[in-house]
Image (cartoon, rainbow, N blue to C red):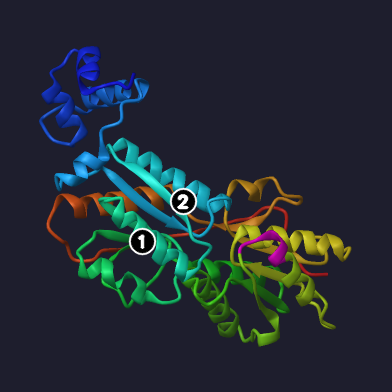
Amino acid sequence: MKATIYDIAREAGVSIATVSQVINGKGKISEKRRAEIMEIMERLNYQPSAIATALTGKQTYTLGLLVPDISNPYFAELARAVEDRSRQLGYSVVICSTDNKDERVERYLNLLQQKKVDGMMIGTGISNAGILTPLLQQSIPFALIARHMPSLAVHTVATDDRLGGALAAQHLLDLGHTRVAVLSEPAGVSSSQERLRGFREVLEKAGHTLAPERIRESTAELNAAKAAVLELLGQSAQPTALFCCNDIQAIGALQAAKELNLRVPQELSVIGFDNTILASVTSPPLTTIAQPIEDLGRHAVDLLIEELKQERQPARNMILKPELVVRESTTVPR
């Protein structure tokens, strides 16, 4: 039989009113006691009726998270950070993979509204920002995570992608590379475009140009990235270094180089972006730009829940700093 609120109260040695306060995030209950009661709820697999709660107009203590692809290690790590922080605050998370497609984003936004989630975090590429307008019109709390949409006055937590691209370019210039190329994601992925922008600016400041034929686009999928890099490296004047706008693309680049019998980093330096767990286990280990993934997830949840507990606040824009992590996939050009 399913556990009831009475079972939780009996196990914890408290009143059902106290359990109810923990469920609803109310009452003067110590954090230690609150955590103990939540642990009992989890152990007994207690599930408050979200439907009944929604029908009464109360919070469901459920949040939505939209990401492009949960199988991508970066978004898996981001989702875990969001889930961990949400759980600490008494919330559950519904995760949706959109493949960066506007029609799927719209479908999931409608679904999450039907499920009466309390708020949403948007961490997916969107070509048409107008998709999010209904959320603003209906005063549905949401925050952007790892995305930039300057046209919308909403809470945003993101990495300084422009700075990250600049760090990648400076690293390659410091090594002596001037014949460089970039593998970016499509235009709808704002974070990737900002990385490309920062990379290009540092090159130009140093007196070098990034020719259009040196830029290729692909989705964040291994096969797509590999195919794009094979095409890029098929040019008569091959680049000596390649900046990939995420680690998945960088791994695709490593595969392409191997297929062409190009040694990394001796004949082609490769630098990625994200610093997921994969970056340290590739061969060679990947030089990359590290995002503070755990901080991104934690701050996004905190901003959203702050919005839920108070009247609508002015939009806050939190930009976190990336860092260069040098491993073995970059070196001086031959």
Q: Which residues are magenta?
A: 220-225
The residue wearing badge 1 is 109
62 in relation to 97, above or below: above
Of helix, strand and loop, which one carries label 2? helix
Q: Position of residue 260 (x, y in %)?
A: 87, 66
Front position in the image: 117 or 183:
117
In the picture provided, is 155 more to the left or to the right than 223? left
- Please tell me which of labels 1 and 2 falls first in the chain: 1
Q: Residue at x 24, y 19 (%)?
A: 8
Q: Position of residue 254 (x, y in %)?
A: 76, 60
Residue situated furthest right in the rendering? 261
- What's under tag 2, amino acid-wise? Ile
Image quadrant occupied by the C terminus: bottom right
- What's under tag 1, amino acid-wise? Leu
The local crowd at label 1, few if under 14, some if 14 to 19, many if 20 or more residues have their Cα within 10 Å, is: many
Kindly tell me whether residue 185 is visible in this rendering: yes
Which quadrant would residue 10 be assigned to in this image?
top left
Q: Residue at x 15, y 61 (%)?
A: 312
Front position in the image: 2 or 191:
2
In the picture provided, is 122 more to the left or to the right than 263? left
Mark closer to the observer (1, 2): 1
In the picture provided, is 16 more to the left or to the right than 232? left
Q: Position of residue 214 (x, y in %)?
A: 69, 81
Front position in the image: 292 or 204:
292
Q: Rounded to the nearest whole Å, what is the CA distance between mark 1 and mark 2?
A: 24 Å
In the picture provided, is 205 more to the left or to the right than 208? left
The residue wearing badge 2 is 293
Q: Is-magenta flag for residue 222?
A: yes
Which quadrant would residue 321 be assigned to in this image?
bottom left
